[in-house]
Image (cartoon, rainbow, N blue to C red):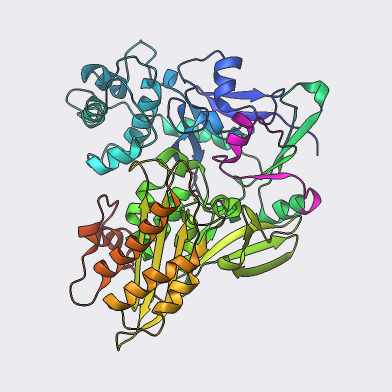
Amino acid sequence: MTTQTIRFVRRGAVHEVHDAPITRTVLQHLREDLHVCGTKEGCAEGDCGACTVVIGELDDDGRLALKAVNACIQFLPTLDGRALFTVEDLRAPDGALHPVQQAMVDCHGSQCGFCTPGFVMSMWALYERQGADAGLPTRDEIDQALSGNLCRCTGYRPIIDATQRMFDVASYPRVALAREPLEAALRSIARSDTFAYEGPDARGAAHGHATFFAPRTLEAFATLRAEHPQARVLAGGTDVGLWVTKLLRDLGDVIYTGQVAELRAIARDAQTLTIGAAVPLEDAYAALAVDYPELAELWARFASLPIRNAGTLGGNVANGSPIGDSMPVLLALDAAVVLRRAARVRTLPLAAFYTGYQKNVLEPGEFVEAIRVPRPVPTLRFRTYKVSKRYDQDISAVCAAFALEIGEDGTIVNARIAYGGMAAIPQRAAHAEAALTGAHWNEAAAQRAMAALDADYQPLTDMRASAAYRLKVARNLLWRCWLETRDDAPLALCDVNAFVFASEAEIVDETGVAPGAALAGDAS
């Protein structure tokens, strides 16, 4: 393939790049190439939010969709065909501050100012997403919008005040983004075929070149993957980006999933929810929560909104981190992975996918195409829990998921229990499951299963938790599951979730499908 230039829309014009390494980050390009320095580098790992920018792209309906992401771990070629917004873009030509910026000034939301541009961009993404007629965001929605930004000076109260106040049209007349010209510009640079960009090695051209491939169809992706089995598959970059910024690794050739429509699709029928491997985590959890509203708190606590906007469910599964929060959930729900190599497609249970620490059964040239999750049955009792040192944006010490199918006579027909953080891989608790299967769901059964966890896991001690703490927490989470789902005095979901994105009623109103419903012909 002939190398092409990276094209994206910035400040109303098409911006082209032709000589940057394929792993040059968006942040590096802004600060070092364009000398646009409002966007800051803090952690270089997507944790602090000082580098937050907003990416715009056309959705399936050809409308502009905006998402806040971390510029420090997004590779520059991933911008091809998209639009980039930074804090410099908000100020009006006459010098007037945007309502988001003015509210920060008026509410004293900035002190040292280092984190302020990142906060402003997260706030602006919320401002644009709400729209003129969407009403004011709730406090939970504001907290989620700011979950990827850290402040050490002002604290969060004045920033939250500013986020609420920026919607006060009486004080700040609304400034809406001109979307139609931007949508036209994005259509003008849209590609119909594979984008191939060759760039010098990050150490310099003398060390060689690497190619960034962004195919547009599943067939083209599968062909490229088979032809380049040693190439690195890149999804959201939320983990691979750190291999470059922290470990200084050379990735070689890269094949990007983010432009393949079939890999970004979500489909639902009467039995199965199928989530394409390149579906962003935010969209994937939204789809899962329709069937499993019990996921609401784990959804809110999975990393931060900018990370969920970029990272993908397929990437989380393929990476196979033992502390990846998606896998215990998917294991407990008996999910399957769809794997593809060229034209060959095979499906296997997720429980059979991992063979060791960050090792799996993928063959050379093979990739994860989709994740299939069974729709819920009326007899299912499902719970998920995450224990970490802080509530937002933290790595789990222990993540647990419990899925119990209870028969009419009160016996457990099927028990699926999975934990993250307890072993070298996300893993089912076979002994605990055996202790529950066929038993009545009562205190004695729960106690037997808790004791059986000792045979299932021998956790490690690390900076997040000791082995003894992890095992005790694992037992206690199973006990909590029993307390919440017991027959005599179960606790309602609203009584146990500290933060809930959407109640069951809201999910029904939005989708027309009640959680747990299995409707023939239902598809999305």
x%, y% of residue 504?
27, 62
Horizontal side of residue 397 vs 229, given as left or right: left
Residue interval drawn in magenta = 226-250
Along the viewing direction, whichever of 283 and 313 lies nearer the viewer: 313
- Please identify the quadrant where the N terminus is shown: top right
Residue 361, by quadrant, is bottom right
Residue 508 to residue 264: above or below: below
Residue 475 in view in this figure: yes
**Residue 232 belongs to magenta span:** yes
Residue 20 x/y as whole percent: 69, 24
Looking at the image, residue 269 sits to the left or right of residue 227; the answer is left
Residue 502 belongs to magenta span: no
Q: Position of residue 364 (x, y in %)?
A: 76, 55
- Residue visible at 64% across and 24% down? 16
Q: How many marks?
A: 0
Residue 273 visible in this rendered orientation of the protein: no
| Between 338 and 258, the one nearer to me in the picture | 338
Q: Is residue 84 left or right of residue 78?
A: left
Q: Residue at x 35, y 68 (%)?
A: 382
The residue at the point 51 percent across, 23 percent down is: 12
Q: Position of residue 507 (x, y in %)?
A: 30, 60
Q: Quadrant of the C terminus?
A: bottom left
Q: Nearer the viewer, residue 297 or 485?
A: 485
